[in-house]
Every structure is written in structure tokens, then in C-alpha cells.
Amino acid sequence: MSQIDINLNTLVDPPHTDSISGRGFGEEYAKTIELLQKIESNNKINFIIDSQYVKAINDSFIKGLFSKIFQKYKTIEEVKKHIQITGSDYFKRLFEKNWLILQEIYNV
Amino acid sequence: MKRLSKEQKLRNEILARKKFRHNIRRKKKNKKLANLNLNKSKVFYSYGVENFCKKNNISEWKNKRQNSYRIDESVNLYENPEKLIRLLLQILNNAKLQKAYPQLIFSGRIKFGSLYLIDNMCWEIAQKRDWGFHFQNINNEDSAILSKLKSFSSSTFENEKVYILNEKVLINRSENQLSNQQYKVKSKEITDLVVKGVRENSDPNFILDPEAYQAISSTIGEHFDNILLHAPDSEFGYLCGFYDKIAKEVQILIFNFGLTIAESLEKANLPKQVQKEINAVITNHTQNKFFKIASKKFTRENALTLLSLQEGISSRMVYDKSRGHGITDFIEHCFNLNSETKIALISGSTAIKIDNKYKIDNKFFIDRKRRIISFNQENDLFLRPDNEYIRNMNVTFPGLIIETRIPLII
């Protein structure tokens, strides 16, 4: 399993923007970076978030980004085998909160 | 007691009928005259505002107090949105029919959201005709705000007490969702203003908490996302950020014209299970006589709007069942930041106010645990909500207004 770094800092445009948002944006970004395909190819994806540049990530963006992943892998436990967050504890908790919701939706 | 003869009774009856018919004819004539005057008017607003007028039969909104309007503290989106919308309609009617400038008589300090919407409608009118207001009893703070607030375009204003940032945001519907949205720039400007305000007034080393960034970003981002996804005809969204340096309170007001929340849900092709549960709630309300038509205190539209606030209930669910979490997430972030947050949501004839009395709670609904807010002690969507928190207005706003007031804990 090889690790691929995805830098979410590139989604903000300092000094003009410091937040990442949009459900559609999340879905589109997942397609652009071929997130599902990379996971299916047994890679570990490391999302890098630097709080100096990214101040907020909207929940809708996170759900859009991971919706297809949870449709396939169902549980946080399975998703965590392929996804890692390198960022502040706040962002780690935020991602986990949204993963919990996605797990509740798709793991039925 | 003198008894009336049959003849007298008959005469009285005929007179009463005549009077009744005369009143109806007079009312019809007045309405016809008002419509005729309106048709003669050369003032036509933009599509959204004209639709707002049409939905509320603008011809009936002539001010009985001639050419003056009163505004006081009670005219605000949180406590009394109906009063504010009525005032806006009267102003719009006046501008279509009257030549003279009206007078706005102030009493006390007016909430910012009210000033903003009045200003916005006045700029709308001013684009169509020569227009202005004579102000009476206006206090210095409100006067300063109104003189600087140019809500028809981008503007910022700052004095020793307030920061205001205002933007008419073009909704970017380009195929490329990765392209930037203007609201994200404004979201950053608002958080920057708050940080600057606190640093200048109290703590030079102040750093905004991640939850505060998240709450402000969520307030703006989730609503513009909703306009993008649920209001396909809306070209613009209006965004205003207001920071009260003295009270240390952030206010964010966003509005757009377009489908109401209830219309959006009714038009949607929902998954069968969800539609079945929504129908069950509506049937339950009907059977329990929650929709009392005479009092108009709670209607089907109010119930549908409330259902749309719940986690995972969205007109876009058919595409993906993880849709429909934006409003719940936004409410949660604001209350995580400060339990004294106050939110007013107005869509169609429904006005909802949210504070810390009724909280979001995880409950089983439809097929899974969801974050639910029902506005009753039991937090049960099948029970009637508190009519202080979900109110039916006798006016309608075709679109959505959301006002969020978050006091910062510094």
C-alpha cells in the first residue's frame, strides 16, 4: 500500500479565501483527484490541511468528498484503512463527525 | 320591547342586503381602482421583487396613514418578521403609486436586519424612479448606518461602533464546480473584520477560535450552497455581515428570491420511504386538527418547512441520500460557538426562530438516527410545534431570508 498526499491547502486562495465549502465542490473534487479509484487501487490517501491557510471546511464539502467512498466501504473502520488526516485536532474531529453521519446513512 | 311587524322585518332585511351588496361593490371598485392605478404605474421592479409584490397582492398594501410609516424595535426578523415584511410591501406599493417622498418615523434603535432590508428595497426602487425617504426621530447610529449602507452593490462601512460588509453575490453556476464562489471571499472578509474589531477594541492578540471560523463559514457557505442547489432561478444572493464592536456580536443576513423551502420539498421526487413519512406527519397533523384554517396559526406549508430543516430531508435526496444536512450543520456550529445565538428563518409564509430553548437532538426518524429539531418539549415531529417558534405569517416572502446573530464570547 503506497501513500498519496492530497493537499487541501491548494483549495483556498490566500489572501482572498480561507474556507473550503460546497457540496458540489466536494463531489467534483473527489472526481478530479480520482479518490475512489486511488482507494480501490489499494493506496492510502493522506489529506493535508494546514490551519494557517485553511480556517474552515464546511460539512457539506466533506460529505460530498466522501459520499461515494462510504457508499462502497460503509464503515469508518474500513475507510480509515485508506484515509488519513494530517491537520489540527479540530479538523480531525470535524472529519470524524461527518464520517459518523455517512456511516449512519450507508451502513444499513 | 317593541315587536317588529312582518313588514318592518322585511324592510330591514332588504336594507341590510342592499347595504351588504353596496359594501361588496365598493370594495370591488376600490380594488379595481387600486389595480388600475398600479397598472398605470410605470414602476416595475426586478423579477424577484415584482414577484414578491404579486404574491402579496401589492395593490392592497396602501398605507392608511397617508404617506408616513412608523418603525420601532419590534419590527425585526427575529421577533416580528411579519411587521417588517408588511412595511416593505407598503413601501413598494407607495413607490409605485405616490409622487411625494414618504416619511419614516423612527422610535428607538432599529435592528440591523430591518434597516438592511428597508435599505435594499429603497435602492431597488431608486433604480426605477426618483426616490427618497424623509426620516423623523432617527438616532445618530441608525442614521450613520443608513447613510453609508449601499446594499445594492458591494460596500463596506466602519465607524467606532460597527463594521458592515455588504455584497450582492452572483451565483456561479458554471459547470466547473471547482471555480471559485464569490461568497467564500466575503466569508473571509467577515471573519477578518471580526478579528480586527476585537483586536482594536479589547484584545490586541486576539485569535478567532476554529469553531468561530467554522460557524461563520458554515452560516455563509451552507446557505449559498442551498441557493446554488435549491434555487435554480436565483441569479443573485444578498449577503450582509455586521459586527457590533460594542456588543461584540456578529450578524449575518442572507436572502434570495426564488422557490420557498416548502415549494422545493413539494416539487421534489423524494425516495418512497421519505415521502411516506412526510405524508404520515402531514396526515397526523390534519387528523389532530393542527392546521386550523380559521386561525391560520399553523399550516401545511409551515409543517413542510419544518420537515425540511431536519437532517437528511432534502429535495435532492434522490441523487444522494447523504444530502440535506447543511441547515442542521449550520445551526449546530452556531450553537457550539455560543448558546445565545439567535437565528431567524423566513421562507414563504413561514417564520421560524431558533434559540437555545429547543435543541437539536439525535432521534430515530424514517430509517435511522437523525439530528432532529421539532420545537416542542418532546422533540417529536408528530406533535404540534411551539407557535412562538414556528409562526405562520399573513404575508409571504417568495424565497428565503436567514438572519443569524452570534454574540462572541471574548
Image (cartoon, coloured by chain):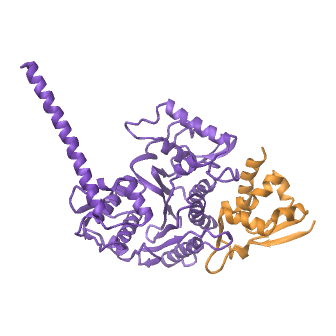
Chain colours: A orange, B purple
Q: As displayed, is residue B356 above or below residue B250?
A: above
Using the rendered view, name the quadrant where residue A35 is placed: bottom right
Query: Where does the image place residue B86, in percent across and percent down from the top left?
Result: 34, 55
Q: As displayed, is residue B171 above or below residue B324?
A: below
Considering depth in this image, is B122 or A74 the residue closer to the camera? B122
Most extreme residue toward the left is: B2
Q: Is residue A92 left or right of residue A79?
A: left
Query: Where does the image place residue B150, in percent across and percent down from the top left?
Result: 41, 75
Query: Where does the image place residue B246, in percent across and percent down from the top left?
Result: 43, 70
* Residue under the image location 40 percent in, 64 percent down: B117
The answer to whether one can see residue B158 in this image is yes
Most extreme residue toward the bottom is: A15
Query: Where does the image place residue B14, in percent across and percent down from the top left?
Result: 14, 30
Q: How many marks?
A: 0
The answer to whether one can see residue B76 in this image is no
Which quadrant is home to the N terminus of chain B?
top left
* Residue under the image location 67 percent in, 69 percent down: B177
Q: Is residue B99 left or right of residue B293?
A: left
Q: As displayed, is residue B378 above or below residue B196?
A: above
Q: As displayed, is residue B111 above or below residue B388?
A: below
Considering depth in this image, is B206 or B256 the residue closer to the camera? B256
Q: Is residue A37 left or right of residue B33?
A: right
Using the rendered view, name the quadrant where residue A26 is placed: bottom right
Considering depth in this image, is B203 or B141 the residue closer to the camera? B141
Considering depth in this image, is A26 or B241 the residue closer to the camera? A26
